[in-house]
Amino acid sequence: MQDPVGFLYNWLIGILTRWGLAAAVAHVLITLLGILILVICAMVLDIFLVWIERKVVARFQDRLGPNRIGPWGIFQPFADIIKLLIKEDITPAGADVIVFNLAPILSLASVLLLWAVLPIAGVIYGVDLNVALLYIVAAGAIGTLSIIMAGWASNNKFALVGAYRMVANMISYEIPMVLILLIPAILTGSMSMLTISRAQSQYWFVLVVPLATLVFLISAIAELGRSPFDLNEGESEIVSGFHIEYSGMKFGLFYAGELLHAFTFGAFISIMFFGGYNGPGVTQMPILGIFYFVLKAMIGYWVIMWVKYTVPRIRIDHMLYFNWKFLVPFSLAILIMTALTHKLLSGYSTPVYILGMLCANLILGWITIEILRARARKQRQSVDPAAQVIAEQVHH
Amino acid sequence: MTALQIIFLLSAAVILVSAVMVVTTRNMVHAALWLIAALFGVAVIFAVLEAGFLAVVQVVVYIGAIAIMFIFAVMLTSREMRDRGPQMNNRTWLAGIVGVLIFGSLVYLLSTWDGFNGQPSVIGNVDTLKQLGNVLLLPSAYLLPFEVASILLLAALVGAVYVASNRK
């Protein structure tokens, strides 16, 4: 049970070569089978994510959520799927049919691509890519592409506005995200997800770089296009943005893609900052890593949902202002600070190292808050004469 | 024929077909999408050559940034997204001859190279990414071009900010 995937691989290749297949062909077949199993697992998980999302949002809004079909309404997603499948499939007049139909497929595919680099356990992973962190950004680029394809091909002004907003959002928030992705790379000297997970067997990186974790969470939510950054959907202004013209299972693909994307980013947060599959007993039983991985990813996903259902949508100028004037300089400062302190403290013992990094983070956070408060005070005085008077009175 | 050769032929075919479609399709957005397909094929070829870093950077930089910027430019500049003019002018034959000449001379030049017929050596278990990083920051290798390029990009950035800022 130390290496279940390797065991299955050897077993299957033994069977196939006994059937008279060449070893190379058998290898390709088994690899394809592995990809298929990984995708099926992700999609089955996705079905239950629909239920989880609906249950959690209901709790946040003081409702019960689905509770009729099966225990706790757990079979509700199957009813949803049947409903989506038997809906009329509408293609709007003037739509670009091929691009219109390609967009939802690409949208879900860009999320499934991410699963290739997820180390689900120490011995279960798609591929140990040495550029996995960049690969995430590349898959995100394909996701952006699918949204602009959907927005353009729908032949609908609302859809196009939604797509434009999404692209503005993703291009902006990609910068802090890429800068923060560099931080695990600095700490481990590798861009491979597996190496990053392995490096956290002693301590989690969130202890070393808490500010980076926070910034990554914010930019991940923005990349996902979830509230408070869900301007691409903006139900009150542009109905539902880029997927306004999609009906039936095509809408279902966008929806499934969004939920799986959120879960996958929860998984990335857990891998890069919360130790991934590491947990008590994993060295003896590597298969136990699946449990810790799913648990941590679910907690990450829950935090993303928590933010989504409690924070209202922000205005687009505020969103861009927040990114370019705050997050980008802030993540640059985190990057410089982390690189310097990591190099200075890497010779010391682990407790000293963690404590030093934590202190550096606290100092940077404190400086940032002070700068923000000074700016807010200045801004308040420039627009509000009453506040100016009060400030003068306090001063005297 | 090995699996690598099949993948190479498939992606080469995808690149060629999409590249032809980029210049022949009349719909500007379709041209941009075909360009993305062509660039994706190039990324596949990089991946086949075990240059994973280049493949991923190809997708991030070209498909992620340039293609989206291109779509933006197309959408914001032209009101009519369909080109109605003739696609050829009277210099088609001249351009064709020049193209064939360049292709022929390139093939000739490559055929004199001793690696033209040989099998490439397998890279094996070397971390190419680490090697690339080392080479880029080695003073005896490519440190100077690397720094010059970064300064050039910085200058472009500062220039863009200067042009875009509204001077008081």
Image: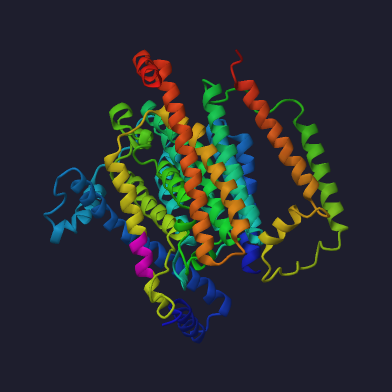
At 48% from the left edge and 61% from the top edge, which residue is drawn? Answer: A116
Q: Position of residue A337 (x, y in %)?
A: 57, 48
Q: With respect to residue A164, does A287 lie above or below?
A: below
Magenta span covers which residues? A290-296
Q: Position of residue A319 (x, y in %)?
A: 42, 32
Left or right: A295, with A21 as reference point: left
| Image quadrant in which you'd find residue A70 | bottom left
Q: Residue furthest right?
A: B112
Left or right: A216, with A290 as reference point: right
Q: Residue furthest front?
A: A396
Image quarter (top left, top right, bottom left or bottom right) of the C terminus of chain A: top left
Of residue B7 and residue A244, the one placed in the foreground of this image is A244
At 82% from the left edge and 63% from the top edge, which residue is drawn? Answer: B115
| Image quadrant in which you'd find residue A231 | top left
Of residue B130 and residue A335, the one placed in the foreground of this image is A335
Residue B21 visible = yes
Q: Position of residue B78 (x, y in %)?
A: 55, 22
Residue A170 visible = no
At 36% from the left edge and 45% from the top edge, which residue is drawn? Answer: A254
Q: Magenta segment: does it hold A337?
A: no
Q: Position of residue B64 (x, y in %)?
A: 55, 42
Main secondary structure along the magenta-highlighted residues = helix
